[in-house]
Amino acid sequence: MYLSQTMITLTLLLLLTGTLVYQTIDIHREMVLNEMKASSVDLKSSTVEHVVNVALPKIFNKALNDAELEVIERYNNGAQNPFFNNVSDALNFIKERTENLTNAYLENISEEYSKMGYNFEYTPIKITNITMVDGFTFKINYTFSYNLSKDGVFKTKDVNSYQYCTVKTILDAYHYVLLSGWSLKDWDYRKMIIIHENSGKNLTDYQVLIKLNSSNFNFSKAKSDGSDIRFTYLNTTTNTEKNISYWIEYWNSTSENASIWIKVPYIPANGDAIIYIYYGNSEATNESNGDVVFDYFDNGSKVSTWNVNSSAGENQSDGNPAPSYYAYANSYMYKNVNLTTNKIITFNVKTNGSGDFYFLCNNTGGGQKYTIGLGGNYISGFANTTSWTVGDTPSNGFNAMSDTWYKFGIVINETKATLYYEQTTDSSPELPANTNGMYTISNNGGYIGLAGHNETTWWDNIIIRKYTNPEPTVNISNQTLIYISPSNFVEDSNSPSIIDMLAGKNENTWGYGIKLVE
């Protein structure tokens, strides 16, 4: 194979750095099957040549991608020397990989023909020359031969042809080196998320809701249950990323909607925090963990940590989802969660009678000042939730429909408490923008409590998190970065790039990295 050094200097870099990940060499299978419907041996032979000619650009790009991944894999495994010591090494790898992939593709054609009663034999394809046409196009010369026969009709041909392979436009093509920090080298995609602080306060370990949908996230690139997603926080001072905790509240890849809570280490007052969501790793397992994300997290399975009175406890067969807590008539349970102001409490609840949720109480949970009444029970010191108002005197509690799960939330700041509720048809109901339900409060204690008045009330998914007003806003980038290199490679202006290497400045320096936009 002949290849001019001058011809490959710039463009081969772009090829090496501008390739995409392909999951299979059977790139045009549907096209193959359609064109294989031709009945005569002559038409079948023409189809073989046409299919190879059309498929070759895709195969060539995959070979380039494999070359990139080989370098990265050796680097990550601690190899002492570069995978490609010189230009010839790189070209030989690309040539051999293109040949192997194309021959495997010819084998697929042979199998399809065999199903139709044809006998198809071939000699392996050989790449004889690679020449540059322009900055993004290469001419690939190749040869192979084949014999095709059916019912006594034979066709033999020696193919000596070529194809033009054009590389996709590259957003960035730099020399990259690996940072010393943590890396998600096995993830294929990432998006940037910018979280803006609106209250004028520095926020530490603040829980933020990330809502994904078809307009800001490609669910087909992630696992169907979302178990491969990961989040990192960018330290803009050191330009390093660290993984952060998350909890998947809701994930539906069919409807393409998801709600995920993340714990952000630091958001500067009136400033931005940069978060990355990674996805696209079929081997990843779920790391969703509400206990780590929230100040308090209880999915109805921790009854042993509560003080339980009479007929209350844990229900293993009912919940949102199961298990959950329950309290029969004249029963209650309570727990010290060290509840303070500047917090939000959320929980799911349903009832076939009436019950109460207590907060900022001192211990037992019975007859406390701050309660939410369910099922029309008269309560003291809180809201008639249907009109979003609050008063000091007793008022009617929330007249919930029987056996229907609702989501309640209580916002507690320094001087006011605000209540909101919604049925759970929305995976993560938001705090209403204009809420008049406020009540001047004084912290009476760090306990929460659950109580039943008549028949039974159930509670589930009790969560306490930090709160500031107004809360941070979330902006999810429309661009998806595809990282063939590990995600936290950065440009190194002091080391030779691949352009330099192919031009002869080969100093065995690592850094064959790329960045593309989907």
Image (cartoon, grey):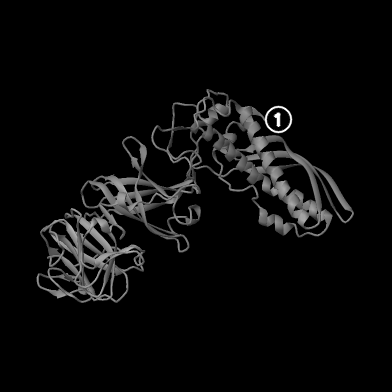
Q: Going by the image, does 265 lie left or right of 415?
A: right
Location of residue 95 (image quadrant): top right
Residue 8 x/y as whole percent:
62, 32
Residue situated in front as seen by the camera: 492 or 93: 93
- Residue sitting at the far right: 152
Q: Can I make out residue 128 in this image?
A: yes
Q: For the N terminus, give its image quadrant.
A: top right
Residue 84 x/y as whole percent:
58, 28
Location of mark 1 (residue): 2
From this view, report whether residue 1 is shown above or below residue 361: above
Other-residue count near label 1 (Cα within 10 Å), few / some / many at <14 / 14–19 / ≥20: few
Residue 327 x/y as whole percent:
24, 68
Residue situated in front as seen by the camera: 137 or 376: 376
Q: Identify residue type, mark 1.
A: Tyr
Q: Secondary structure at mark 1?
A: loop
From this view, report whether residue 184 is shown above or below residue 365: above
Report the residue at 60% width, 39% height from top: 64
Q: Going by the image, does 454 lie left or right of 119?
A: left
Q: Going by the image, does 154 lie left or right of 20?
A: right
